[in-house]
Amino acid sequence: MQPIHYTMWEEPNGWRGYLKDHPDQVVQGKSFDDLQLKLRHLQRDLSGQSRRQELPPPKAPPRAA
């Protein structure tokens, strides 16, 4: 299984992000966890993987102090 490479950022109304290989497929989540789930589903759908095979969650970005 290959790691998921992504870009994500926080906005006033939630989180947005996209997969590195698919920058035109931006997804939005109400929370960081919601966005992680949507990015995993997008990766699965774009790669043609079975819904039964679960992808590992992406790691949280570092928080600014």
Image (spheres, grey):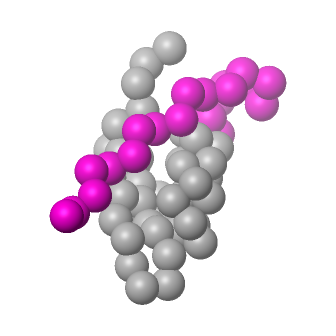
Residue lying at the far bottom of the rendered structure: 12
User: Can residue 14 be found in the magenta stretch?
Assistant: no
The residue depicted at 77 percent of the width and 31 percent of the height is 51
Residue 22 against residue 30 in the figure, above or below? above
Query: Residue 26: image x %, image y %?
Result: 45, 63
* Viewer-nearest residue: 45 or 15: 15
User: Can residue 47 be found in the magenta stretch?
Assistant: yes
Query: Residue 41: image x %, image y %?
Result: 64, 44
Image quadrant in which the C terminus is located? bottom left
Residue 37 against residue 13 in the figure, above or below? above
Magenta extent: 44-65
> In the picture, residue 17 is in which quadrant?
bottom left
Query: Residue 56: image x %, image y %?
Result: 55, 27
The residue depicted at 56 percent of the width and 66 percent of the height is 31
Residue 48 against residue 8 in the figure, above or below? above
Residue lying at the far right of the rendered structure: 52
Residue lying at the far top of the rendered structure: 1
Residue 18 against residue 12 in the figure, above or below? above
* Viewer-nearest residue: 21 or 34: 34
Number of marks in the image? 0
- Could one spot residue 46 in this view of the protein? no
* Viewer-nearest residue: 59 or 42: 59
Residue lying at the far left of the rendered structure: 65
Magenta stretch, main secondary structure class: loop
The residue depicted at 39 percent of the width and 79 percent of the height is 11
Query: Residue 34: image x %, image y %?
Result: 62, 58
- Could one spot residue 63 in this view of the protein? yes
